[in-house]
Amino acid sequence: MARRREDVDWYVEMSDALERRQQRRKWIVLALAVSLPLILMGGAVAAIYLHQHGHLERWFGIAKRRLTAPRTTEQPKAFDPVSVKKFQGGDIIYSQLDRNGFVTSISHFFREVGPNPDAPNEEFVVNRIDLDQGKIALYRLRNVGTGEAFEFRDVAVNRLVSGEWVITADGQKLIRDQLQARMRVQIRLIRK
């Protein structure tokens, strides 16, 4: 009976040892599965950092590629200014906003007037940046109700496919911000 008990004990011990070994293998496989991608990501981040700061080129003699065009000493091509009769026809309506930013019943009506108060039919001058973009040298609006004139400089404009010049969203924002500052009320463009 003692021999049998020794065999059973040996079998139980071997079975437990096998289970422990299998558990260790699972943990080792899991650790490798988790750590290997982390090590690879860390290596990639380090390589990108070293490349951006020029260390890889210095250490391994790798030639750094230029992603930008070579610098030239020639000046950008200048475009002739363009005369434009009008940008926005009819009334330009701004609605006044309350303190919470809601539209009120108060509206402010404006009309374009020429850049020269003495010659109202004079055309606006657009200083072109390229073929289809530019800035109005001097843009003027007159409040229809009060008669007060407002001047704006360097208002951004674009040329449409039809050839018509229009004020861009940035230009409209510049006009609105300056009108708000001068009139001391918040306004929103309703109709151009």
Image: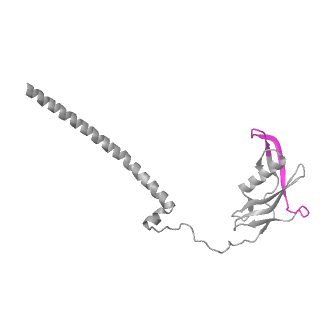
- Residue that lies at the very extreme toward the front in this rendered image: 59
* Position of residue 31 in the picture relative to residue 54 (left or right): left
The span picked out in magenta is 95-120
> Does 48 sit above or below residue 72?
above
**For the N terminus, which image quadrant?**
top left
- Residue that lies at the very extreme toward the bottom in this rendered image: 74
Q: Nearer the viewer, residue 155 or 2?
A: 2
Snapshot colouring: one colour
Q: Nearer the viewer, residue 88 or 62?
A: 62
> Does 62 sit above or below residue 11?
below
Q: Nearer the viewer, residue 15 or 158?
A: 15
Magenta span includes 99: yes
Residue 157 x %, y %: 73, 61
* Position of residue 122 in the picture relative to residue 155 (left or right): right
Residue 139 x %, y %: 81, 59
Q: Nearer the viewer, residue 181 or 93?
A: 181
Give the residue displayed 40% in from the left and 51% down from the top.
39
- Residue that lies at the very extreme toward the top in this rendered image: 1
Give the residue displayed 12% in from the left and 27% down from the top.
5
Magenta span includes 29: no
Q: Please tell me how many numbered marks the rendered image carries.
A: 0
The answer to which image quadrant residue 138 occupies is bottom right
Residue 184 x %, y %: 83, 45
The answer to which image quadrant residue 3 occupies is top left
Residue 111 x %, y %: 84, 55
